[in-house]
Amino acid sequence: MTYVIGAACIGTTDRSCVDVCPVDCIHEVAQMLVIDPGECIDCSLCEPACPVSAITPGEGVAPDERAFIEINAAWPDGAEAVDRLVAEYQAGS
């Protein structure tokens, strides 16, 4: 399983993780950044670069943030799909 960007990234515009990603698998949507699991090579360079500690290995995602596995995985469906899932998460929080 690849890395996942979680709730701490919502509203954060810092792109330090993007700068260190060797395969450009981190993408920006309206409210956060997401990692495309199909592009991620599990290099782990993004995790320590994140200033808000929003990035975790997929198997380490906290139970209350499991929705972010789906949110990140929605990137291939387009930014609109990701934005919808983020909005649903926020509405349920």
Image (cartoon, helix red, strand yellow):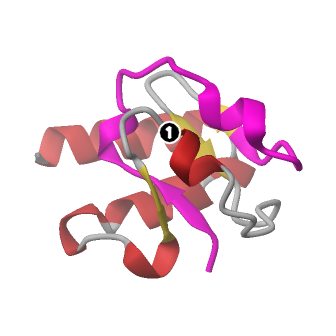
Q: Residue at x 18, y 66 (%)?
A: 64
Q: Is residue 17 magenta?
A: yes
Tag count: 1
Which quadrant holds residue 7?
top left
- Identify residue type, mark 1: Cys
Q: Residue furthest top?
A: 13
Front residue of 49 and 70? 49
Q: Is residue 11 above or below residue 75?
A: above
Which quadrant holds residue 21?
top right
Q: Is residue 63 above or below residue 51?
A: below
Q: Position of residue 26 (x, y in %)?
A: 70, 42
Q: Which residues are magenta?
A: 1-26
Q: Mark 1 highlights which residue?
A: 50
Q: Residue at x 13, y 48 (%)?
A: 92
Q: Is residue 41 magenta?
A: no
Q: Position of residue 28 (x, y in %)?
A: 63, 28
Q: Position of residue 1 (x, y in %)?
A: 62, 80
Q: Is residue 40 left or right of residue 62?
A: right
Question: SS class of the residue under badge 1?
Answer: loop
Q: Is residue 30 above or below residue 51?
A: above
Which quadrant holds residue 84?
top left
Q: Residue at x 49, y 17 (%)?
A: 13
Q: Position of residue 14 (x, y in %)?
A: 52, 20
Q: Residue at x 74, y 52 (%)?
A: 76
Q: Is residue 64 left or right of residue 68?
A: left
